[in-house]
Amino acid sequence: TILIAEKEKVSDHELFLLKVAALYHDTGHLKSSENHEAESCRIAMQDLAEQHFDETEIGQICNMIMATKIPQQPKSNIEGILADADLEYLGTSEFDFISDKLLSELKHFRPELTTNQWLSMQIDFISKHKDHTEYCRTHYEPTKMKNLEKIQEKARLLF
């Protein structure tokens, strides 16, 4: 989040709000994986009000958190920054490692999930994914496309 925010040249205050949103954006998983973004907002609203954040700041933070919900639909640059940071791994060399961890997590909840189904899910997801910041479009898109090609090749070999 910090790297993308700096490259997108946000203000110091926006960077602060982005850091807070990044810290809270997955806290909702503590209660439920279903609609965890809304739960993350509830947790953030309660905590941040106690920390004397004003309503506007809390609203901005919750909007950033909600912008990470799939399908991502950020409405501002700072929302796009958090959305991109949340899925940055798609365009990095860490893709295979993180993808394997996500598969393990999914198999915990859906043990019947097959490798073929997982590959199809990834191909569909990455094919539809769009980066929201200029920095990510420039710096992560090429590697994301290579990662997609690798998955497509694995799928061809398995199908």
Image: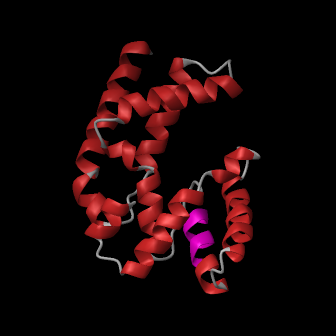
**136 left or right, relative to 37:** left
* 28 magenta-colored: no
Q: Is residue 79 visible?
A: no
The answer to which image quadrant residue 151 occupies is top left
Outermost residue toward the top in this view = 158
Residue lying at 70% horizontally and 67% vertically, measured from the top left: 47
Quarter of the image where the C terminus is located: top left
| 150 left or right, relative to 63 | left
Q: Main secondary structure of the magenta part?
A: helix
Residue 45 visible in the current orientation: yes
x and y percentages locating residue 80 in the rendered image: 44, 67
Q: Residue at x 58, y 63 (%)?
A: 65
Q: Identify the residue shown where x is 41% and y is 45%.
A: 127
- Residue drawn at point x = 43 percent, y = 78 percent: 14
- Estimate the x, y position of residue 58 in percent, counting from the top left: 63, 77
Left or right: residue 95 compared with residue 60: left
Q: Residue 98: x, y in percent? A: 43, 33
Q: Is residue 86 above or below residue 16?
A: above
State whether residue 135 is above or below residue 159: below
**Magenta stretch in the rendered image:** 60-66
The residue sitting at the front extreme is 51
Position of the N terminus, as image quadrant, is bottom left
Instruction: Find out whether residue 65 is within the magenta segment.
Output: yes
- Total number of numbered discs in the rendering: 0
Horizontal side, residue 111 vs residue 19: left or right? right
**Residue 73 coordinates in the image, percent (x, y):** 53, 66
The image's colour scheme reads secondary structure
Q: Nearer the viewer, residue 148 or 109?
A: 109
Quadrant of res 135 = bottom left
